[in-house]
């Protein structure tokens, strides 16, 4: 007995069921099947022909279309490493990563053109807005600062960076002028210069946000540096500086005196980047040594290590690791630093120590990508060891998370909001920032 009545036994090949199936096939299903097959074949042709349109051979030159302000030889410079590469083995994501890493250009399309002189890698690009005023707001648990800067990230069309402006807020008032000239020809060094003046109310806190020192200083600083890319990924640098710090107001446990310092700073860095279609990731390591000779105050040494490792697990979802360490033996309170160089957010912004070693390890996932940029969410676990007269010696840890917005139309790397929790002190830290990567 069947589910809907008795089963019919007999010869199916001569049955009404077979005749019904044949009728449906010949008059209904057969035309639909062949129409679908023809559609699938035609859809396959563009995929096959797209691959066949990549000419086999080696790239002889690069053509860039769409430049308005950027000089052609400047845009060509970071792409010269692709000349001589075999077209069939080249992953165009490598090209996209190099172009996006300039911070100025975005690729609209990329293709290979076969000419009598050889194969040309042709890029159609658009330039980001590089000259703009920046009303800047930095708000967080440690207070708020407001400023205005005129920024040009493509000065004179050379991809140089120029900044002039100032800030006012919880920490006092600061005026800054800065210029960075990037190497745009093989064998050419880059250089940078900085002028800064600030009247700063300095507050040094412990992990519980209790104020241990409070005093006001006037600071004047000049610096000039050179850097040279020895290879595609390895860069060496050296800088000289002059700093004058004077005490203006002494409220709580101030330093014994101000300082006049002559600084000498050699260093090196390793850096590479890649692009997964959603997020630009970097892998970098830098080591810097500072020697500051005191005409007034205390001479001191400082060694600083910083590393970033970002790697896509799948497109738009990546591992994000950051680490930093600072060692400043023999310094006085004027030369102690905050936790930012340890790459952590779980300590108060006004926290002060001589030595740090910290890390932040987490994951970042893009949420939405649209015309103005890409929005992502980031979560991490952070830990930091510190040592100093105010801080003592301790290891702190806790979670951190927030949102980042990577801008595609404006030549600023990112904006973001963040919250972090220190499990040792029980305090939350909130921050909002706009990155410039100067």
Image (cartoon, helix red, strand yellow):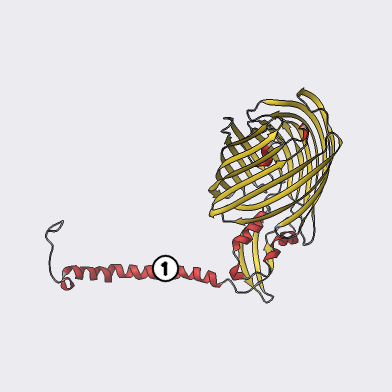
Residue 17, image x and y in percent?
Answer: 18, 67
State the image quarter where residue 80 is shown: bottom right
Q: 324 or 414, which lies in front? A: 324
Q: Is residue 373 at least partly visible in the picture?
A: no
Residue 228, image x and y in percent?
Answer: 78, 56
Q: 155 or 304, which lies in front? A: 304
Q: Is residue 5 left or right of residue 279?
A: left
How many callouts does the rendering have? 1
* Above/below status of 25 relative to 103: below
In the picture of the structure, the residue carrying the numbered disc 1 is: 40
Q: Residues within 10 Å of mark 1 (few under 14, many from 20)?
A: few
Outermost residue, right side: 295
| Residue drawn at 64 percent across, 53 percent down | 283
State the image quarter where residue 347 is shown: top right
Outermost residue, top side: 251
Residue 92, image x and y in percent?
Answer: 60, 63
Residue 285, image x and y in percent?
Answer: 68, 51
| Residue drawn at 80 percent across, 59 percent down | 188
Q: Is residue 101 at least partly visible in the picture?
A: yes
Helix, strand or loop at label 1? It is helix
Q: 167 or 23, which lies in front? A: 167
State the image quarter where residue 27 is shown: bottom left
Which quadrant of the rendered structure holds the N terminus? Answer: bottom left
């Amino acid at each position: 007995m069947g589910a809907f009545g008795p089963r019919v036994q007999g010869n199916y090949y001569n049955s009404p069921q077979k005749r019904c199936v044949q009728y449906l096939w010949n008059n209904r299903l057969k035309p639909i099947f062949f129409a679908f097959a023809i559609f699938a074949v035609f859809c396959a042709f563009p995929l096959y022909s797209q691959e066949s349109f990549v000419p086999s051979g080696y790239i002889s030159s690069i053509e860039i279309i769409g430049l308005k302000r950027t000089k052609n030889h400047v845009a060509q410079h970071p792409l010269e490493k692709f000349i001589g590469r075999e077209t069939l083995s080249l992953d165009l994501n490598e090209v996209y990563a190099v172009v996006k890493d300039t911070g100025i250009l975005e690729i609209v399309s990329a293709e290979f053109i076969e000419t009598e002189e050889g194969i040309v890698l042709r890029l159609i690009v658009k330039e980001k807005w590089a000259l703009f005023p920046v009303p800047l707001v930095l708000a967080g648990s440690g207070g708020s600062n407001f400023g205005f800067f005129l920024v040009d990230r493509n000065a004179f069309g050379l991809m140089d960076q120029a900044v002039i402006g100032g800030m006012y807020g919880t920490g006092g008032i600061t005026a800054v002028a800065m210029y960075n000239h990037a190497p745009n020809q093989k064998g050419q060094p880059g250089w940078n210069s900085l002028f800064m003046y600030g009247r700063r109310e300095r507050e040094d806190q412990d992990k519980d946000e209790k104020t241990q020192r409070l005093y006001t200083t006037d600071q004047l600083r000049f610096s000039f540096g050179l850097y040279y890319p020895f290879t595609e990924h390895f860069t060496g640098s050296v800088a000289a500086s002059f700093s004058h710090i004077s005490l203006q107001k002494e409220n709580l446990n101030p330093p014994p005196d101000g300082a006049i310092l002559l600084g000498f700073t050699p260093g090196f860095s390793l850096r590479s980047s890649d692009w997964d279609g959603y997020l630009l990731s970097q892998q970098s390591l830098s080591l810097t040594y500072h020697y500051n000779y005191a005409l007034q105050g205390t001479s001191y040494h400082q060694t600083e290590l910083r590393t970033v490792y970002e790697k896509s697990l799948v497109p738009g979802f990546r591992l994000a690791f950051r680490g930093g360490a600072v060692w400043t033996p023999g310094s006085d309170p004027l030369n102690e630093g905050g936790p930012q160089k340890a790459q952590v957010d779980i300590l108060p912004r006004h926290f002060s120590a001589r030595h740090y070693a910290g890390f932040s390890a987490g994951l970042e996932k893009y949420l939405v990508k649209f015309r103005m940029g890409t929005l992502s969410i980031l979560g991490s676990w952070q830990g930091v060891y510190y040592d100093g007269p105010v801080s003592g010696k301790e290891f702190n840890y806790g979670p951190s998370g927030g949102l980042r917005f990577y801008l595609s139309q404006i030549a600023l790397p990112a904006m973001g909001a963040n919250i972090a929790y220190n499990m040792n002190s029980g305090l939350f830290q909130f921050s909002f920032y706009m990155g410039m990567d100067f």
